[in-house]
Amino acid sequence: MILLILRFLLLIWPARTEIAESANTALPGCSDSCSGVAIPYPFGIGPKCSMSEDFELSCVTINRSSTPYWGDLAVLDINLSLGQARTSTPISYQCYNSKTKEIKYSDWSVWVPPFWYNHEKNKFVVIGCDTLAFVNFTNDQNSYLCGCVLGCGSLENMTNGSCSGIGCCENSIPSGTNNITLWFDDKYNNSEVCSFSPCSYAMLVEEDGFHFNTSYITTSQLQYQNTSVVIDWAVGNTTCNAARTSKSFACKSKYSNCSDSNSGPGYICNCSDGYQGNPYLQGGCIDIDECWRNNNNNLQECELNWVPLVGICAGIVALCFLGLGTYMILERRDLSKIKEKYIQQHGGWILLEEIKSKQGFGFTIFTRQQIEQATNNFDRANIIGYGGQGTVYKGTLRDQIFAIKKCKIIDESRKGEFGKEMLILSQINHKNIVKLVGCCLEVEVPMLVYEFISNGTLFQYIHSKKQGSCISLATRLRIAQESAEALAYLHFSASPPIFHGDVKSANILLDQNYTAKVSDFGASILALTDEAQFVSLVQGTRGYLDPEYMQSCQLTEKSDVYSFGVVLLELLTRKPVIDFDAPEKEMSLCTRFLSAMKEKNMQNLLDDEISNEDGMQMIMEVAELAKQCLNIKGDERPTIKEVAEELDRIRKLKLHPWDQVYTAEELETLHSQESHNIVIDHSEYFSMDKEAEEIIDVGR
Ligand SMILES: *[C@@H]1O[C@H](CO)[C@@H](O)[C@H](O)[C@H]1NC(C)=O
Ligand SMILES: *[C@@H]1O[C@H](CO)[C@@H](O)[C@H](O)[C@H]1NC(C)=O
Ligand SMILES: *[C@@H]1O[C@H](CO)[C@@H](O)[C@H](O)[C@H]1NC(C)=O
Ligand SMILES: *[C@@H]1O[C@H](CO)[C@@H](O)[C@H](O)[C@H]1NC(C)=O
Ligand SMILES: *[C@@H]1O[C@H](CO)[C@@H](O)[C@H](O)[C@H]1NC(C)=O
Ligand SMILES: *[C@@H]1O[C@H](CO)[C@@H](O)[C@H](O)[C@H]1NC(C)=O
Ligand SMILES: *[C@@H]1O[C@H](CO)[C@@H](O)[C@H](O)[C@H]1NC(C)=O
Ligand SMILES: *[C@@H]1O[C@H](CO)[C@@H](O)[C@H](O)[C@H]1NC(C)=O
Ligand SMILES: *[C@@H]1O[C@H](CO)[C@@H](O)[C@H](O)[C@H]1NC(C)=O
Ligand SMILES: *[C@@H]1O[C@H](CO)[C@@H](O)[C@H](O)[C@H]1NC(C)=O
Ligand SMILES: *[C@@H]1O[C@H](CO)[C@@H](O)[C@H](O)[C@H]1NC(C)=O
Ligand SMILES: *[C@@H]1O[C@H](CO)[C@@H](O)[C@H](O)[C@H]1NC(C)=O
């Protein structure tokens, strides 16, 4: 039993420690590490991911192992708060071959502008027993020459661990230098001491990591090794005070401080007290949540005082408890860490900081617990639909009803951008667009929380042919225009523009007044780019997808226009977009429509309810508009703004009786619907459209 618990603990330990990770981050969309070396901004891999050329690294892969390189130098780690980085630097050597009597040597010149060698941590070290080595430290203005001479007849009196002057000499280096050249004087060439010391070495080395070892004298292997050298880096070439006024001031986070570099011009940024993260990124510094951290530490201390030693039996019981207790603490601590990790992964810190800085922002970050409570632990009974990328639940939180979308998966490479994207989406505010009211980031795949729209989807409204569910032309045109305006807002007023990517009647919701509310507009942003996802998207949106998009996989604003054209057809015909019962040629509503237009034979396709004399002119104009939207060539389609304007014009064509929000007939329709639930007639329309079939009773 104990063994079992111990083994269990052992099993879970390694997994636990992996989760702790630094809060430093790269630019969104950029890789934040190379082969385990964290690469925080301003550094980055490639020109787009780094602040400037000076901070550009490359992740070089040789024989399946990769290494980050800064110029010719391999980078070991980068420390943001100190403004330092460790690099791997070759050792200079001079070796005497007693057989050939030849001297082999390498003189290195390593330069690191615009950065500098750290003068406090690095030392110039020479090893050997018949050696005179020089180093020339230079920068733009100065040069300093320094040398070491060593002579020893045997290994006697050498001590391990200290560079005492016997066999090893060390010297500090001047500050502010960025070019070193190491060389040996060839009069001292190891020929006299080659019996025990074939080589001499000269190097720049981080003092902390260097311990002299008498084996260095006797070996010839150091010539193949590198030392770690600390480099000071800084941004800009001015002081903080001078830089602060400039637009390119690099301390982007609101909660950051600036300090001048000790080694040369330029400055480094740090997060203010109580914050941590990356000060070079907007929103990069995050409040350290001291509360739960302390909480967890205390908990752990309490538990560990529990070790009782009362007899074997009690011992076993106690051990079991201890194991369990420790496990539970670990679990608890981990949950927080995992949550934190997810928030971090999703770029949530940006969002959190933004929300903190803006009052009345109208956007809530929900906790996992709240969401679970609201949806009764994702009870199937609360499912109100299956969207393109996930399941939509109805949830009640603080007496308010929300629609909660749980995405299936999220594109790995774009994970970090989630927070930023939420920020964009949360600022969308249009009367015909479903409002995004919050999100939950504490989970592996983020969840989106939308306002709840009560009267179902346009899809249900159109395709439920219940008795009396007659929809007037005026209502259809209004819904069309409202939807077009919503899309026009996304395309032209949102910054940056948002392409919906999944326009269809099932994504247009209706509120109590049958006002159109476009939903799921985040879909395009969250959409995966890989093939599997594309295939599922194509399936889910069959009949609506822009043929150009299917070929290029490139979503454009005109893809939305095409899909909207299909919605217009649905409104005009009340027929399914794809009719699987029909012969193959007539399956697609779009194809049928286009050929009907060609043959001037629209009448047959139209919904009987609206094809009366009065509305015919308007209907034909809408049909013409739909035809333009469905143009095979994206470039030749109108913009959604033009579509909205055209619909507006058509609606005004005949002011009476369509100038009112509701006609008497419409009101009657509405009444009749009160008593009938809109029920999807599965047999007739949806056996083919899995997704539509799964939309169960939306809004009730
Ligand atoms: C890569 O592997 C090959 C064959 O194993 C070896 O000859 C070569 O030296 C390796 N290169 C490096 C840089 O390690
Ligand atoms: C030594 O350093 C150089 C330059 O940083 C690098 O290219 C090389 O791979 C390093 N070699 C070893 C064995 O680390
Ligand atoms: C940077 O250096 C400081 C001081 O030595 C240390 O506390 C911190 O952990 C280092 N950060 C990283 C990312 O190595
Ligand atoms: C050291 O470097 C500087 C600048 O490159 C050069 O002018 C000077 O001659 C060098 N000194 C020696 C002794 O090589
Ligand atoms: C080692 O140190 C002792 C005592 O200082 C000295 O007598 C001896 O000559 C030294 N040996 C060598 C090889 O320098
Ligand atoms: C130093 O360490 C090496 C290797 O462990 C050992 O061979 C040598 O005798 C040691 N030298 C002294 C002076 O302790
Ligand atoms: C570095 O200094 C050496 C002389 O010490 C000089 O020859 C070399 O050109 C310098 N390198 C650069 C890039 O300035
Ligand atoms: C090594 O140095 C000795 C003494 O300075 C000299 O006599 C000898 O020629 C040198 N050997 C070589 C290969 O340069
Ligand atoms: C000295 O170096 C040898 C070989 O690199 C190593 O085995 C030994 O542990 C080192 N000794 C000390 C005291 O560092
Ligand atoms: C400082 O940097 C800016 C931009 O990189 C550059 O234009 C300017 O010449 C630099 N000034 C100095 C004194 O190096
Ligand atoms: C749909 O809207 C009508 C008219 O406002 C309303 O009476 C009815 O209750 C709504 N239906 C549902 C299911 O909310
Ligand atoms: C529906 O319309 C009425 C009257 O215009 C308005 O008071 C009400 O707020 C609307 N309901 C919704 C959900 O927009």
Image (cartoon, rainbow, N blue to C red):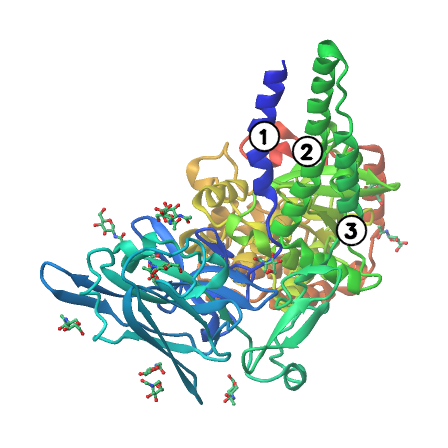
Q: Kindly check if marks 1 and 2 are in contact, taking CB atoms under 8 A apart as contact.
A: yes
Q: Circle 1 sits in a helix, a strand or a loop, which is it?
A: helix
How far apart are the alpha carbons under marks 3 and 1?
A: 26 Å
Q: Is residue 455 visible?
A: no
View extreme (top): residue: 313
Q: Kindly check if marks 2 and 3 are in contact, taking CB atoms under 8 A apart as contact.
A: no
Q: Mark 3 points at which residue?
A: 290
Please state if 90 lies on the left or on the right of 383 as rendered. Answer: left
Give the crowd class for mark 2: few <14, some 14-19, many >=20 residues within 10 Å: some
Q: Name the residue under label 1.
A: 12
Q: Circle 2 sits in a helix, a strand or a loop, which is it?
A: helix
Which residue corresponds to the image point at 71% horizontal and 54% vertical from the top-left? 479
Give the crowd class for mark 3: few <14, some 14-19, many >=20 residues within 10 Å: few
Pick the quarter of the image with the N terminus.
top right
Which residue corresponds to the image point at 43% horizontal and 45% vertical from the top-left? 531
Give the crowd class for mark 1: few <14, some 14-19, many >=20 residues within 10 Å: some
Q: Can residue 687 be seen in this view?
A: yes
Which amino acid lies under the numbered mark 1 shown in the image of this protein? Ile
